[in-house]
Amino acid sequence: QVQLVESGGGLVQPGGSLRLSCVASGFTFSSYYMSWVRQAPGKGLEWVSNIYSDGSNTYYADSVKGRFTISRDNAKNTLYLQMNSLKSEDTAVYYCAKDLGSSYDYWGQGTQVTVSS
């Protein structure tokens, strides 16, 4: 069965960095777009970034552009999100999702990122 397992979240001070990972299994990882989506406390889901199946193209929400970098290692079935210059408004649960282009069919369990001094 499809599994997506995120890790790497935690508590970080404003201006700090974190790197999230998402290990995929149960499907041909290298054949699919992948996305990161987040949910801040009391708010709805917000798309953060996505990446083509071969990693050739990446896209970002305006709120994270220039600070976050999405990448993937298809040999390791792993998706990454490098987050730099973190702000308090980046506090959220971050999910990786298998991206069908217009929807997501599988999600991970999420990893909490808290940005606070």
Image (cartoon, helix red, strand yellow):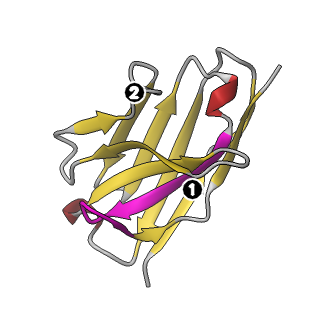
Q: How many residues crowd mark 1 within 10 Å: few (<14), some (14–19), many (20+)?
A: many
Horizontally, is 26 left or right of 102 in the view? right
- Is 44 located above or below residue 68 in the figure? below
- Is 60 located above or below residue 17 in the figure? below
Q: How many residues crowd mark 2 within 10 Å: few (<14), some (14–19), many (20+)?
A: few
Give residue 8's position: percent from left, percent from top: 62, 44
Dominant SS of magenta comes to strand
Q: Residue at x 21, y 54 (%)?
A: 53
Q: Which of the 4 quarters of the picture holds residue 61?
A: top left
Magenta segment: does it hold 73?
no
Q: Residue at x 46, y 21 (%)?
A: 67
Give residue 20's position: percent from left, percent from top: 54, 42
Q: What is the number of callouts on the image?
A: 2
Residue span colored magenta: 92-104
The residue that mark 1 highlights is 6
Q: Which of the 4 quarters of the picture holds residue 62?
A: top left
Magenta segment: does it hold 101?
yes
Q: Amino acid at mark 1?
A: Glu
Query: Taking the image as drawn, is residue 75 in sight?
Result: no
Horizontally, is 43 left or right of 99 in the view? right
Q: Residue furthest front?
A: 43
The mark closer to the camera, 1 or 2, is 2
The residue that mark 2 highlights is 62
Image quadrant occupied by the C terminus: top right
Give residue 98's position: percent from left, percent from top: 36, 64
Q: CA distance from mark 1 to mark 2?
A: 23 Å
**SS assignment at label 1:** strand
**SS assignment at label 2:** loop
Q: Residue furthest right?
A: 117
Give residue 10's position: percent from left, percent from top: 73, 39
Q: Residue furthest bottom?
A: 1
Label 1 vs 2, first from the N-terminus = 1
